[in-house]
Image (spheres, rainbow, N blue to C red):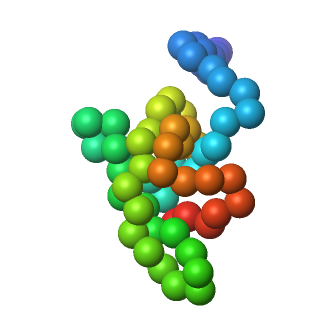
Amino acid sequence: MSVDGSIVIAQKDNVLRLPRAVVRARPDGTAQIQVWAHGQIEKRQVKVGLKGDSYTEILSGLSAGETGW
């Protein structure tokens, strides 16, 4: 027999987040992402928070409703 489990170390609700594949966080807690803004693609520096298996929290540099990839 085998068992799978997970341990939750930290959790936040109602946060801005992007798929982890989109955000490649640097050791200093920042990342550069591409954002669709004003009809064109722009590179933007964001500050990241908690990182999970699927999503990364965005603390600043992106607003709700903006599309990043």
In x, y percent, where is residue 15?
A: 67, 36
Q: In the displayed structure, does residue 65 sit left or right of residue 45?
A: right
Residue at the far front in the pictured view = 38
Q: Quadrant of the N terminus?
A: top right
Is residue 68 at all visible to an observer of this figure?
A: yes
Camera-nearest residue between 1 and 9? 9
In x, y percent, where is residue 56?
A: 52, 41
- Please give the name of the residue rendered at 72% of the width and 27% of the height, measured from the top-left corner: 13
Residue at the far bottom in the pictured view = 39
Q: In the displayed structure, does residue 42 sit left or right of residue 9?
A: left
Q: In the displayed structure, does residue 4 sit left or right of residue 42?
A: right
Count of marks, rendered view: 0
- Please give the name of the residue rendered at 44% of the width and 75% of the height, measured from the top-left corner: 42
Residue at the far left in the pictured view = 27
In the image, residue 62 sits, relative to residue 8, either above or below, namely: below
In the image, residue 43 sits, relative to residue 19, either above or below, namely: below
Q: Quadrant of residue 9?
A: top right
- Please give the name of the residue rendered at 64% of the width and 43% of the height, measured from the top-left corner: 16
Camera-nearest residue between 4 and 16? 16
Is residue 24 at all visible to an observer of this figure?
A: no
Q: Quadrant of residue 65?
A: bottom right
In x, y percent, where is residue 48?
A: 44, 39
Camera-nearest residue between 42 and 55? 42
- Please give the name of the residue rendered at 45% of the width and 68% of the height, measured from the top-left corner: 34
In the image, residue 5 sits, relative to residue 48, either above or below, namely: above
